[in-house]
Image (cartoon, grey):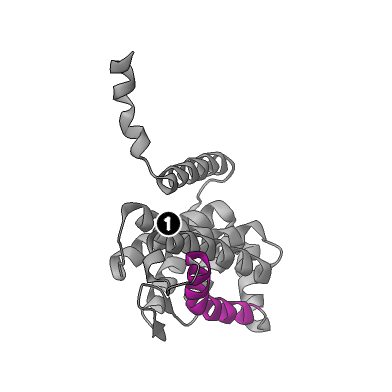
Amino acid sequence: MNSILSIFKDFEKIKWYSLAIVIILIFISIFLYLAQKRQKFTTKALVYGGVAISLSFILSFIKLYRMPQGGSITPASMLPLFAYAYMFGPFAGIVAGMAYGILQLIQDPYVVHWAQLILDYPLAFGALGFAGFFRKNLPLGILAGGFGRFVFHVISGVVFFASYAPKGTSPLLYSIIYNATYLAPDLAVCFVLAFIPGLKNSIDRVKAQT
């Protein structure tokens, strides 16, 4: 009996956040599996996805302000991905966001742990695809996608960057303020642009064609 228990003794060393990330990945995998059975990628969806990722990637190189522990303010680099999710739905949006997250990892990596890498890159940027759950309201979708990304970055900050919090400051409060500092302005620009009639009509026209 002891020999059998010894096989599993290393499970006691698993940190709670590692277990939480594994559970999140399992749920995401289940979602993607179920979603892909309902939505097939057409040639148009693939082409538009490539264009959206490329536009976001190009805009991400224009950094108006760079944060010391990762993150930066850009001129609405998330908007093309929000628009893509709005046009093609959450599954396509999440996949495109994850692909963009990998490009961000290559472009400007800030990695201290494998779990932090997963949280801050594929999961955080994949969450931008949550905008696809609101295909009748782009501004609301932008808020949902932006908040999803914010949540993953905050979790990463609490778990892996708590040591940067000033003495006496809650790691959660520090992570919320830190991530809101660069995400809020970026998201605000995307939100405002979504109300511009010309841009909104163009997105809606393309959506109707898809």
Amino acid type, label 1? Leu
Q: Residue furthest right?
A: 136
The answer to whether 76 is drawn above or below residue 123 in the figure is: below
Q: From the image, which quarter does the C terminus lie in?
A: bottom right
Q: Which residue is mark 1?
A: 119
**Horizontal and vertical percent for residue 76?**
50, 79
SS at mark 1? helix
Q: Quadrant of residue 54?
A: bottom left
Residue 173 is a magenta residue: yes
**Horizontal and vertical percent for residue 82?**
55, 67
Q: From the image, which quarter does the N terminus lie in?
A: top left
Residue 2 is a magenta residue: no
Q: Nearer the viewer, residue 188 or 196?
A: 188
**Horizontal and vertical percent for residue 31?**
55, 43
Q: Nearer the viewer, residue 90 or 197?
A: 90
Q: Residue at x 34, y 21 (%)?
A: 5
Q: Residue furthest front?
A: 168
Residue numbers of the magenta segment: 171-194
On the picture, is 101 further left or further right than 184? left
Q: Quadrant of residue 56?
A: bottom left
On the picture, is 122 further left or further right than 149? left
Q: Main secondary structure of the magenta part?
A: helix
Q: Nearer the viewer, residue 164 or 184?
A: 164
Q: Residue at x 61, y 69 (%)?
A: 142
